[in-house]
Image (spheres, grey):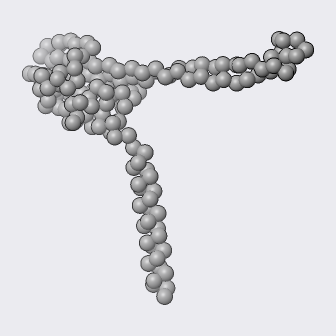
Amino acid sequence: MANSRHRTIWALRGGCLAVVTLLASSCANPQAELALRAPVAMVGMSKASLLSCAGVPERSAVAGDAEYLVYTRRQTLVDRDVDWEPSPWLGPRGPMLWEPDVTTWSRTYNCEATFELHGGQVTAVRYNDRRDPTLCYQIVGNCMR
């Protein structure tokens, strides 16, 4: 009897662990994960393939035998918060009238991907610090399919 109870408890624990694992994995962003794998997966890609899947770079430079292609994506999000406050400026009826108090702020996210090429082949892919991997996916997503 105790052995059967022990098995039931372990089965319940295993089921709870499976549910927690499923919930945690459902929060992952597959686009961001692909973008973070791209610096390794894209090494060896030809310049022609890179241009066909990523498009025309924003900037390019040549230094010695190295060629650098730079792609950039930016996104600005604007948020607004509206609070309704009693108007003290409208005389004796002011407290009965409300006016909006609007607060606006913005956040800018970006990703800059630099591809280093030697001999027409990608040898390195670097992203800027403090990047947004989802925006990086917009650069490399077609190349990772």
Q: Is residue 29 left or right of residue 106?
A: left
Q: Is residue 119 left or right of residue 97?
A: left
Q: Residue at x 39, y 49 (%)?
A: 25
Quarter holding residue 18: bottom left
Where does the image place residue 62, in percent across and percent down from the top left? 17, 12
Where does the image place residue 138, in percent across and percent down from the top left? 31, 27
Q: Residue at x 85, y 20 (%)?
A: 95
- 52, above or below 27, in the image: above
- 121, above or below 87, in the image: below
Q: Residue at x 81, y 19 (%)?
A: 97
Q: Could you say which is closer to the camera, residue 45 or residue 126?
A: 45
Q: Residue at x 42, y 21 (%)?
A: 75
User: Could one spot residue 36 in this view of the protein?
Assistant: no
Where does the image place residue 96, in percent across and percent down from the top left? 85, 21
Where does the image place residue 23, in percent across and percent down from the top left? 44, 52
Q: Is residue 31 left or right of residue 62?
A: right
User: Could one spot residue 29 in this view of the protein?
Assistant: yes
Q: Is residue 20 left or right of residue 137?
A: right
